[in-house]
Amino acid sequence: MNPCIPPEYRAHRAPDLPVPVDEPQPEPQPVHPHHPNAPVPQDDPVPDHNPSAQRATIRL
């Protein structure tokens, strides 16, 4: 300790905090499709019917 520093300005060590224990998670249940939190099904991507066409770019 540095005697030139008053005690109220000295750094102190934070108290040890308890280590949180992970609680066991319940087994995932199948989600009903009409439930509001059900995952949204993704649509299939639309194929590009004219891949040789170049998209027009606007130059300023």
Image (cartoon, grey):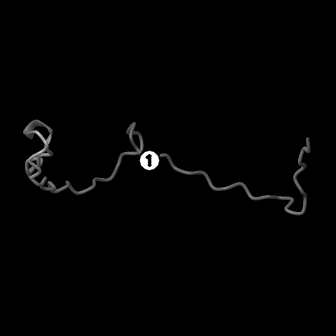
Query: Toward the viewer: 11 or 32?
Result: 11
Task: Give the residue at x 15% y 45%.
Answer: 11
The amino acid beneath tag 1 is Pro
* Outermost residue toward the bottom in this view: 52
Query: Toward the viewer: 13 or 42?
Result: 13
Q: Position of residue 32 (x, y in %)?
A: 36, 45
Drawn side of residue 54 relative to residue 22, left or right: right
Q: Position of residue 3 (x, y in %)?
A: 8, 47
Q: Quadrant of residue 38?
A: top left
Is residue 47 shown above or below 7? Answer: below
Task: Give the residue at x 56% y 51%.
Answer: 42
Is residue 37 shown above or below 56? Answer: above
The residue that label 1 is drawn on is 39
Residues packed near mark 1 inside 10 Å, few (<14), some (14 to 19) or many (20 plus): few
Q: Position of residue 54 (x, y in %)?
A: 89, 57
* Outermost residue toward the front in this view: 4
Drawn side of residue 8 relative to residue 25, left or right: left
Is residue 10 shown above or below 53? Answer: above
Question: Count the marks: how many?
Answer: 1
Q: Quadrant of residue 45?
A: bottom right
Q: Secondary structure at mark 1?
A: loop
Q: Quadrant of the C terminus?
A: top right
Drawn side of residue 41 relative to residue 44, left or right: left
Query: Toward the viewer: 32 or 40?
Result: 40
